[in-house]
Amino acid sequence: IALFYIGIAFAYFITLPAILHFFISVSPESVAPMTDINSYLSFCLKLFLVFGLTFEIPIITLVLILIGVVSTQSLAEKRRFIVVGCFFIAMFVTPPDALSMIMLAVPMWLLFEIGLFCRKFCIFLWSLSRFSTFSLFFFNQNNFIKKRRELIKFCFCTICLCVEFSSSSWSSSLLLTF
């Protein structure tokens, strides 16, 4: 959740002023910039949502590596394709200017690299505390591949419990059926 808010803050304090300055600077001098509040708020909310979700990339990368969907080595080998993919996604999600595309694609790439670094840091922590039961379970890649279904059940049940404590009624029925 903290990364989501950091992404929103990045969009609000850095990206949004740059994009608005760009839009005003490329408009003709005879045109006064008068946007309606609905389109402005819609634009800002979409921008905040995109940047908030983008800043979740380290968590997504780390979870995919830990549950065995991809490996750190395969992601490192496909790094150049991932960088191109970041620019490709940023091209469609941002307004039609190069500045906002770069301001989204570069953080996406850097956050992907942070996710890879976090996995390497987890391996380092595992090597420091080999005899801990917690670290043997949570940092061993082979154990995750074998126990993928139990891990997914555990994550789903944890999410349902969090939703249950936030006073939602649908999670209790899902938790009981699982």
Image (spheres, grey):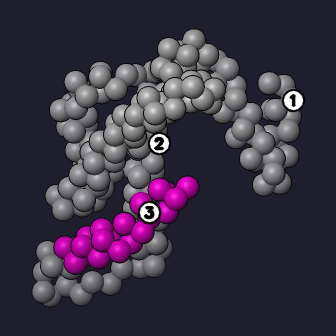
Amino acid carrying mark 3 in the image: Ile
Q: Is residue 7 magenta?
A: yes
Distance from the alpha carbon under mark 2 to that under mark 1: 28 Å
Q: Which residue is mark 1?
A: 176
- Decide which of 57, 137 is in the foreground and name it: 137
* Mark 2, other Cα within 10 Å: few <14 / some 14–19 / many ≥20: some
Magenta range is 1-22
Instruction: Mark 2 or mark 3: name the one nearer the start of the chain.
Output: 3
Q: Is residue 178 above or below residue 99?
A: above
At mark 2, the secondary structure is helix
Residue 1 image point, x, y percent: 55, 55
Q: Position of residue 168 (x, y in %)?
A: 81, 50
x, y percent for residue 160? 75, 39
What distance separates the C-alpha of mark 1 from that of mark 3? 35 Å
What distance separates the C-alpha of mark 2 from that of mark 3?
Answer: 14 Å
Q: Residue at x 49, y 63 (%)?
A: 5
In this rendering, position of residue 53 left or right of residue 165: left
Q: Which residue is mark 3?
A: 6
Residue at the disc numbered 2:
59
Name the one closer to the observer, 144 or 70: 144
The residue under label 2 is which amino acid type? Ile
Looking at the rendered image, the disc whose residue lies closer to the viewer, 2 or 1, is 2
Mark 1 vs mark 3: give the one in front.
3
Report which quarter residue 159 is drawn in. top right
Relative vertical location of residue 163 with respect to residue 120 in this rendering, above or below: below
Q: Is residue 48 left or right of residue 166?
A: left
